[in-house]
């Protein structure tokens, strides 16, 4: 429930989320001005779902005092989406929360993976900022930190210009040199045989598959890989390409079921009996935010 202490907390963390917190504060203030201080407001944090990450997953292997002094750690993002996907998967499969052991892939313009055990997040691919992890529309995801200095020196850029490049000129856009829109990339690759469009798609799918492998190890096996986000919910081709080669892990794609899951449909697309199932479960962050808000303003926790 937003009170002065919560507002101060968001303000205190502006340096950790410079692209988000100042705008969110302005929105809260505008709503307060328009509606009056008597109308309660609730803040739902995208990092909250990942507060269950164990130290081994959230600490970077850098000098420990940096964590103490500057709160440098992996926070993870897209938490409301991963929580929404896990919640809906649990309903669809009639499981208890403690029995949810899945890998969720939110693939949109921003992309992240999450390893969920006992219904809670135990690892996720975004880190201190949303730059880490999977290949995204315009973000590089994982790379060697030594590249920052190297690129800056070679290209005559400042470190913050390199960081901006990694955030807004990289990923699918950077590799293809064409677009960050997966629909257009697929058309360029399939219809016009564009080499770099094809390469961008390949690197995108390979990185996602690597994370599935890593999270299978982190979880000690999983029951399902669950896709969501604009790409995850709409592109059967990308889902198939990410899942290709995971038969060793027990995931066998049913091509027909996969092809039918577009435009917000939900369901399983692995063949009956796959020990690692594949699902599409559209994310519904707004619903969770509404439920959280209702619970908080009606006095729940
Ligand atoms: P989001 O950020 O979740 O809205 O997702 C945006 C991304 O979803 C963009 O890269 C779109 O190109 C992609 N997308 C939406 N529809 C499709 C589709 N039918 N096939 C492939 N990608 C799609």
Image (cartoon, grey):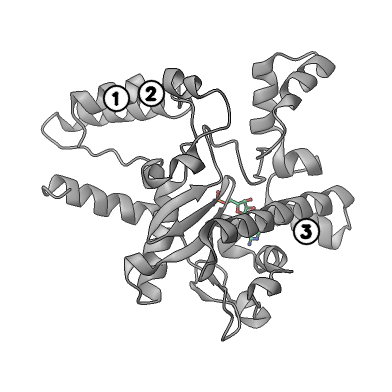
Residue located at (43% from left, 24% from top): 71
Neighbour class for label 3 at 10 Å: few (<14), some, many (≥20)?
A: some
Q: Quadrant of residue 135?
A: top right
Taking the image as shown, residue 5 lies to the left or right of residue 113, namely left
Circles 3 and 1, Cβ within 8 Å, touching? The answer is no
Report the mark closest to the observer, 3 or 2. 2
| Circle number at residue 187 | 3
Report the mark closest to the observer, 3 or 1. 1
Q: Which residue is label 1 attached to? A: 9
- Secondary structure of the residue carrying numbered label 3: helix
Taking the image as shown, residue 205 lies to the left or right of residue 59, namely right
| Circle number at residue 13 | 2
Residue located at (23% from left, 47% from top): 293
Neighbour class for label 2 at 10 Å: few (<14), some, many (≥20)?
A: few
**Looking at the picture, how far across and down is residue 42, in whole percent?**
24, 39
Q: In the image, is the residue at mark 1 within 8 Å of ligand 1 by its beta carbon?
A: no
Q: Which of 62 and 235 is in front in this view?
A: 62
- Secondary structure of the residue carrying numbered label 2: loop
| Circle number at residue 172 | none
Q: In the image, is the residue at mark 3 within 8 Å of ligand 1 by its beta carbon?
A: no
Circles 1 and 2, Cβ within 8 Å, touching? The answer is yes
- Secondary structure of the residue carrying numbered label 1: helix
* Ligand 1 rendered quadrant: bottom right
Q: Is residue 284 at all visible to an observer of this figure?
A: no
């Amino acid at each position: 429930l937003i009170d002065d202490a919560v507002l101060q907390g968001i303000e205190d963390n502006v340096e950790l989320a410079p692209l988000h917190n100042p705008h969110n504060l302005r929105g809260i203030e505008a709503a307060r001005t328009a509606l009056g201080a008597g109308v309660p407001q609730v803040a739902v944090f995208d990092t909250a779902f990942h507060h269950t990450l164990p130290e081994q997953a959230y600490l970077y292997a850098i000098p420990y005092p940096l964590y103490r002094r500057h709160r440098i750690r992996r926070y993870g993002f897209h938490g409301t989406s991963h929580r929404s996907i896990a919640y809906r998967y649990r309903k669809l499969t009639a499981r208890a929360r403690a029995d949810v052991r899945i890998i969720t892939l939110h693939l949109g313009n921003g992309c992240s993976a999450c390893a969920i055990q006992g219904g809670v997040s135990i690892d996720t691919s975004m880190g201190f900022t949303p730059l880490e992890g999977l290949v995204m529309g315009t973000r590089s995801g994982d790379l060697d930190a030594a590249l920052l200095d190297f690129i800056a020196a070679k290209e005559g850029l400042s470190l913050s210009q390199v960081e901006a490049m990694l955030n807004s000129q990289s990923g699918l856009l950077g590799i293809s040199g064409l677009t960050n829109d997966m629909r257009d990339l697929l058309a360029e690759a399939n219809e016009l045989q564009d080499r770099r469009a094809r390469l961008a798609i390949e690197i995108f799918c390979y990185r996602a598959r690597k994370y599935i492998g890593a999270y299978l190890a982190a979880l000690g096996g999983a029951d399902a890989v669950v896709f969501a986000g604009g790409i995850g919910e709409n592109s059967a081709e990308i889902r198939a390409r990410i899942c290709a080669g995971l038969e060793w892990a027990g995931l066998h794609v049913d091509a027909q079921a996969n092809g039918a899951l577009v435009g917000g449909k939900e369901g399983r697309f692995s063949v009956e009996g796959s020990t690692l199932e594949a699902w599409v479960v559209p994310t519904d962050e707004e619903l969770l935010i509404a439920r959280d808000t209702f619970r908080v303003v009606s006095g729940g926790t």
